[in-house]
Image: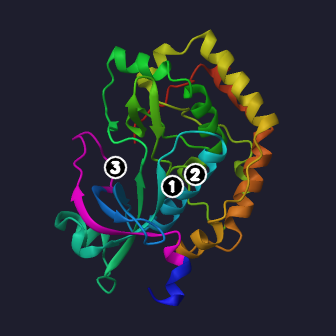
Amino acid sequence: MLPGLQPIFSVCGHAEQLNVKLRTPSDKNPNDVYFGTVLLPGCRERAHAYVKIFPPATRLQLVYNEVIAHHLALQCELPSPFTFPCACPVSLMRSGSRAFMVPDDRYPFVLGVASFDGGFKDTKQSANRSAAAVADVMNWPQVARVAVFDELLGNDDRHLENLVRRGPHDYLTIDNERILFGEQWFGRDLARFRARPCDPNILADTIGEATDEVMKKRMMSVAQYFVSGTLLEVPDVAGRLEQLCSAPAGTTDRLVAMLNDRRALLQTLMHYHVRKGDLFQARTNR
Protein backbone atom coordinates (compact mmCIF):
# COMPACT_ATOMS: atom_id res chain seq x y z
CA MET A 1 0.00 0.00 0.00
CA LEU A 2 1.29 3.43 -0.87
CA PRO A 3 1.95 5.52 2.27
CA GLY A 4 -0.30 8.34 1.07
CA LEU A 5 -3.27 5.97 0.70
CA GLN A 6 -2.98 4.41 4.15
CA PRO A 7 -5.25 6.93 5.95
CA ILE A 8 -7.97 6.44 3.33
CA PHE A 9 -7.81 2.66 3.34
CA SER A 10 -8.04 2.66 7.14
CA VAL A 11 -11.74 3.54 6.66
CA CYS A 12 -12.35 2.26 3.10
CA GLY A 13 -12.69 -1.34 1.95
CA HIS A 14 -12.03 -2.82 -1.50
CA ALA A 15 -14.38 -5.09 -3.47
CA GLU A 16 -12.63 -8.15 -4.91
CA GLN A 17 -15.68 -10.01 -6.29
CA LEU A 18 -19.25 -8.81 -6.86
CA ASN A 19 -22.42 -10.67 -7.80
CA VAL A 20 -25.56 -8.74 -8.74
CA LYS A 21 -28.33 -8.96 -6.17
CA LEU A 22 -31.62 -8.69 -8.04
CA ARG A 23 -34.39 -6.57 -6.52
CA THR A 24 -38.13 -7.05 -6.71
CA PRO A 25 -39.81 -5.80 -9.92
CA SER A 26 -41.65 -3.04 -7.99
CA ASP A 27 -38.44 -1.55 -6.64
CA LYS A 28 -37.78 1.74 -8.47
CA ASN A 29 -34.56 2.41 -6.58
CA PRO A 30 -31.78 3.34 -9.03
CA ASN A 31 -28.98 1.91 -6.87
CA ASP A 32 -27.03 -1.19 -7.85
CA VAL A 33 -26.81 -3.81 -5.10
CA TYR A 34 -24.24 -6.62 -5.06
CA PHE A 35 -23.12 -9.41 -2.75
CA GLY A 36 -19.48 -10.41 -2.85
CA THR A 37 -16.04 -10.61 -1.28
CA VAL A 38 -14.65 -7.42 0.21
CA LEU A 39 -11.30 -6.57 1.71
CA LEU A 40 -12.20 -4.81 4.94
CA PRO A 41 -10.79 -1.39 5.94
CA GLY A 42 -7.20 -1.75 7.03
CA CYS A 43 -6.68 -4.49 4.38
CA ARG A 44 -6.23 -7.17 7.04
CA GLU A 45 -9.30 -9.34 6.53
CA ARG A 46 -11.81 -10.43 3.89
CA ALA A 47 -15.54 -10.90 4.38
CA HIS A 48 -18.71 -11.57 2.42
CA ALA A 49 -20.63 -8.31 2.31
CA TYR A 50 -23.44 -6.47 0.60
CA VAL A 51 -22.22 -3.58 -1.56
CA LYS A 52 -24.37 -0.73 -2.82
CA ILE A 53 -23.40 1.71 -5.56
CA PHE A 54 -25.32 4.95 -6.02
CA PRO A 55 -25.79 7.03 -9.18
CA PRO A 56 -22.92 9.49 -9.69
CA ALA A 57 -24.82 12.74 -9.04
CA THR A 58 -25.40 11.98 -5.35
CA ARG A 59 -22.96 9.12 -4.79
CA LEU A 60 -20.49 10.67 -2.35
CA GLN A 61 -23.11 12.26 -0.12
CA LEU A 62 -25.12 9.03 0.10
CA VAL A 63 -22.03 6.99 0.98
CA TYR A 64 -21.31 9.50 3.72
CA ASN A 65 -24.93 9.31 4.95
CA GLU A 66 -24.85 5.53 5.18
CA VAL A 67 -21.54 5.37 7.02
CA ILE A 68 -22.11 8.20 9.48
CA ALA A 69 -25.61 6.90 10.32
CA HIS A 70 -24.06 3.51 11.13
CA HIS A 71 -21.66 5.06 13.63
CA LEU A 72 -24.42 7.14 15.22
CA ALA A 73 -26.66 4.07 15.46
CA LEU A 74 -23.97 2.28 17.44
CA GLN A 75 -23.74 5.25 19.80
CA CYS A 76 -27.49 4.90 20.33
CA GLU A 77 -27.10 1.16 21.07
CA LEU A 78 -28.93 0.06 17.94
CA PRO A 79 -28.02 -3.06 15.94
CA SER A 80 -26.29 -2.00 12.73
CA PRO A 81 -24.05 -4.14 10.49
CA PHE A 82 -20.49 -2.90 10.04
CA THR A 83 -20.86 -0.28 7.29
CA PHE A 84 -17.98 1.39 5.46
CA PRO A 85 -17.00 3.01 2.14
CA CYS A 86 -15.84 0.50 -0.46
CA ALA A 87 -13.77 1.03 -3.60
CA CYS A 88 -15.44 -0.98 -6.37
CA PRO A 89 -13.62 -1.85 -9.61
CA VAL A 90 -15.69 -0.76 -12.60
CA SER A 91 -14.82 -4.05 -14.28
CA LEU A 92 -16.85 -5.92 -11.62
CA MET A 93 -20.02 -3.87 -12.09
CA ARG A 94 -22.93 -5.18 -14.11
CA SER A 95 -22.74 -4.20 -17.75
CA GLY A 96 -26.40 -3.19 -17.94
CA SER A 97 -25.95 -0.13 -15.74
CA ARG A 98 -22.25 0.59 -16.16
CA ALA A 99 -22.67 3.40 -18.68
CA PHE A 100 -25.14 5.15 -16.37
CA MET A 101 -23.19 4.54 -13.17
CA VAL A 102 -19.77 5.38 -14.64
CA PRO A 103 -20.25 8.10 -17.27
CA ASP A 104 -16.55 9.02 -17.02
CA ASP A 105 -14.42 6.03 -17.99
CA ARG A 106 -11.15 7.62 -16.80
CA TYR A 107 -11.50 6.07 -13.37
CA PRO A 108 -11.11 2.31 -12.77
CA PHE A 109 -12.98 2.46 -9.43
CA VAL A 110 -16.18 3.99 -8.05
CA LEU A 111 -17.01 4.50 -4.39
CA GLY A 112 -19.77 2.35 -2.94
CA VAL A 113 -20.85 1.43 0.56
CA ALA A 114 -20.46 -2.06 2.01
CA SER A 115 -21.98 -3.74 5.04
CA PHE A 116 -21.74 -7.10 6.72
CA ASP A 117 -22.73 -8.63 10.03
CA GLY A 118 -19.82 -10.66 11.33
CA GLY A 119 -21.80 -12.19 14.18
CA PHE A 120 -24.62 -13.80 12.21
CA LYS A 121 -24.28 -16.01 9.14
CA ASP A 122 -27.99 -16.53 8.50
CA THR A 123 -29.46 -13.09 7.84
CA LYS A 124 -32.31 -12.38 5.47
CA GLN A 125 -33.61 -9.20 3.87
CA SER A 126 -37.23 -9.74 2.91
CA ALA A 127 -40.24 -7.88 1.57
CA ASN A 128 -42.57 -10.28 3.41
CA ARG A 129 -45.57 -8.22 4.64
CA SER A 130 -47.63 -11.06 6.10
CA ALA A 131 -49.43 -10.66 9.41
CA ALA A 132 -46.83 -12.91 11.02
CA ALA A 133 -43.95 -10.77 9.68
CA VAL A 134 -45.62 -7.59 10.95
CA ALA A 135 -46.19 -9.11 14.38
CA ASP A 136 -42.59 -10.29 14.52
CA VAL A 137 -41.27 -6.78 13.82
CA MET A 138 -43.66 -5.14 16.27
CA ASN A 139 -42.46 -7.51 18.99
CA TRP A 140 -38.82 -6.65 18.33
CA PRO A 141 -37.63 -4.95 21.55
CA GLN A 142 -35.79 -2.26 19.56
CA VAL A 143 -38.64 -1.22 17.28
CA ALA A 144 -39.64 1.92 19.23
CA ARG A 145 -36.00 2.90 19.63
CA VAL A 146 -35.41 2.62 15.87
CA ALA A 147 -38.47 4.79 15.21
CA VAL A 148 -37.17 7.55 17.48
CA PHE A 149 -33.64 7.25 16.05
CA ASP A 150 -35.02 7.67 12.53
CA GLU A 151 -36.95 10.72 13.68
CA LEU A 152 -33.76 12.13 15.18
CA LEU A 153 -31.85 11.69 11.92
CA GLY A 154 -34.75 12.69 9.66
CA ASN A 155 -34.75 9.28 7.95
CA ASP A 156 -38.07 8.95 6.07
CA ASP A 157 -37.27 5.58 4.50
CA ARG A 158 -37.61 2.87 7.15
CA HIS A 159 -39.71 -0.02 5.86
CA LEU A 160 -39.62 -3.79 6.13
CA GLU A 161 -37.01 -4.17 3.40
CA ASN A 162 -34.73 -1.87 5.39
CA LEU A 163 -34.67 -4.32 8.26
CA VAL A 164 -32.65 -7.53 8.02
CA ARG A 165 -34.00 -10.44 10.06
CA ARG A 166 -31.50 -12.34 12.18
CA GLY A 167 -34.00 -14.46 14.09
CA PRO A 168 -37.33 -14.22 15.93
CA HIS A 169 -37.92 -10.59 16.96
CA ASP A 170 -34.33 -9.74 16.06
CA TYR A 171 -33.30 -7.38 13.23
CA LEU A 172 -30.51 -5.21 11.87
CA THR A 173 -31.17 -1.71 10.57
CA ILE A 174 -29.82 -1.00 7.08
CA ASP A 175 -30.23 1.63 4.33
CA ASN A 176 -29.77 5.00 6.00
CA GLU A 177 -28.98 6.94 2.83
CA ARG A 178 -31.97 9.30 3.28
CA ILE A 179 -30.97 10.93 6.57
CA LEU A 180 -31.89 14.63 6.77
CA PHE A 181 -35.03 13.98 4.75
CA GLY A 182 -33.21 12.80 1.63
CA GLU A 183 -31.90 16.28 0.86
CA GLN A 184 -28.47 17.15 -0.52
CA TRP A 185 -27.31 18.93 2.60
CA PHE A 186 -23.51 19.21 2.31
CA GLY A 187 -22.50 22.83 2.80
CA ARG A 188 -26.01 24.00 3.75
CA ASP A 189 -27.29 25.60 6.95
CA LEU A 190 -28.37 22.66 9.12
CA ALA A 191 -30.43 24.83 11.50
CA ARG A 192 -33.35 24.49 9.07
CA PHE A 193 -33.55 20.77 9.89
CA ARG A 194 -33.56 21.13 13.68
CA ALA A 195 -37.33 21.25 14.23
CA ARG A 196 -38.58 19.63 11.02
CA PRO A 197 -40.83 16.58 11.57
CA CYS A 198 -39.96 13.45 9.64
CA ASP A 199 -42.95 12.94 7.40
CA PRO A 200 -43.88 10.33 6.30
CA ASN A 201 -42.83 8.75 9.56
CA ILE A 202 -40.96 5.58 10.16
CA LEU A 203 -41.20 1.92 9.27
CA ALA A 204 -43.96 2.04 6.62
CA ASP A 205 -47.67 1.48 6.18
CA THR A 206 -47.12 -2.30 6.25
CA ILE A 207 -46.94 -2.17 10.04
CA GLY A 208 -49.14 0.85 10.59
CA GLU A 209 -52.11 -1.25 11.68
CA ALA A 210 -50.15 -2.60 14.64
CA THR A 211 -49.63 0.81 16.22
CA ASP A 212 -51.57 1.09 19.49
CA GLU A 213 -51.56 3.03 22.74
CA VAL A 214 -48.85 0.81 24.20
CA MET A 215 -46.55 1.56 21.27
CA LYS A 216 -47.26 5.29 21.55
CA LYS A 217 -46.25 5.24 25.21
CA ARG A 218 -43.07 3.39 24.29
CA MET A 219 -42.31 6.13 21.77
CA MET A 220 -42.60 8.83 24.38
CA SER A 221 -40.48 6.89 26.86
CA VAL A 222 -37.75 6.27 24.30
CA ALA A 223 -37.84 9.89 23.15
CA GLN A 224 -37.32 11.01 26.74
CA TYR A 225 -34.39 8.61 27.07
CA PHE A 226 -32.71 10.07 24.01
CA VAL A 227 -33.13 13.55 25.45
CA SER A 228 -31.67 12.72 28.84
CA GLY A 229 -29.32 9.84 28.17
CA THR A 230 -27.76 10.01 24.70
CA LEU A 231 -25.21 12.66 23.76
CA LEU A 232 -23.92 12.03 20.25
CA GLU A 233 -20.20 12.38 19.58
CA VAL A 234 -18.19 12.91 16.40
CA PRO A 235 -16.88 9.45 15.35
CA ASP A 236 -13.14 8.91 15.01
CA VAL A 237 -13.55 8.19 11.28
CA ALA A 238 -15.16 11.56 10.58
CA GLY A 239 -12.18 13.44 9.13
CA ARG A 240 -11.12 10.64 6.79
CA LEU A 241 -14.72 9.98 5.78
CA GLU A 242 -15.22 13.64 4.90
CA GLN A 243 -12.05 13.60 2.81
CA LEU A 244 -13.11 10.44 0.98
CA CYS A 245 -16.63 11.72 0.28
CA SER A 246 -15.58 15.28 -0.64
CA ALA A 247 -17.57 16.71 2.27
CA PRO A 248 -16.57 20.18 3.51
CA ALA A 249 -14.20 19.98 6.46
CA GLY A 250 -16.14 20.01 9.72
CA THR A 251 -19.32 18.56 8.17
CA THR A 252 -19.62 15.91 10.86
CA ASP A 253 -19.08 18.39 13.68
CA ARG A 254 -21.92 20.52 12.34
CA LEU A 255 -24.18 17.51 11.83
CA VAL A 256 -23.63 16.12 15.33
CA ALA A 257 -24.13 19.53 16.92
CA MET A 258 -27.46 19.98 15.12
CA LEU A 259 -28.64 16.47 16.04
CA ASN A 260 -27.79 17.04 19.69
CA ASP A 261 -29.91 20.19 19.56
CA ARG A 262 -32.68 18.22 17.83
CA ARG A 263 -32.73 15.69 20.71
CA ALA A 264 -34.36 18.31 22.92
CA LEU A 265 -37.32 18.42 20.51
CA LEU A 266 -37.82 14.67 20.12
CA GLN A 267 -40.77 14.40 22.47
CA THR A 268 -42.48 17.30 20.70
CA LEU A 269 -41.78 15.72 17.31
CA MET A 270 -43.12 12.33 18.39
CA HIS A 271 -46.23 13.99 19.90
CA TYR A 272 -46.75 15.59 16.49
CA HIS A 273 -46.97 12.14 14.92
CA VAL A 274 -49.21 10.78 17.70
CA ARG A 275 -51.66 13.63 17.10
CA LYS A 276 -51.45 13.19 13.34
CA GLY A 277 -51.86 9.42 13.61
CA ASP A 278 -49.08 8.52 11.19
CA LEU A 279 -46.64 6.66 13.43
CA PHE A 280 -45.25 3.71 11.46
CA GLN A 281 -47.17 4.81 8.37
CA ALA A 282 -44.72 5.94 5.69
CA ARG A 283 -46.64 6.55 2.47
CA THR A 284 -43.92 5.28 0.15
CA ASN A 285 -41.42 2.45 0.10
CA ARG A 286 -38.43 3.91 -1.75
Residue 30 in the image: state x and y as whole percent.
33, 55
Q: Residues within 10 Å of mark 1 (few under 14, many from 20)?
A: many
Given residues 276 and 239, the one toward you in this image is 239
Residue 48 in the image: state x and y as whole percent.
32, 55
- Is the C terminus in the top left, top right, bottom left or bottom right quadrant? top left
Quarter where residue 136 is shown: top left
Q: Which residues are magenta?
A: 8-32
Q: Label 2, on which residue?
A: 69
Q: In terms of secondary structure, where does tag 3 sit?
A: loop
Q: Is residue 175 magenta?
A: no
Which numbered disc covers residue 66?
A: 1
Say which amino acid is labelled 3: Asn
Q: Nearer the viewer, mark 3 or mark 2?
A: 2
Residue depicted at 60% across the width and 71% down the height? 242
C-alpha separation, residue under disc 3 versus residue under disc 2:
20 Å
Which numbered disc covers residue 204?
A: none
Given residues 281 and 129, the one toward you in this image is 129
Given residues 6 and 136, the one toward you in this image is 6
| Direction from residue 34 to residue 244 in the image, left or right | right
Say which amino acid is labelled 2: Ala
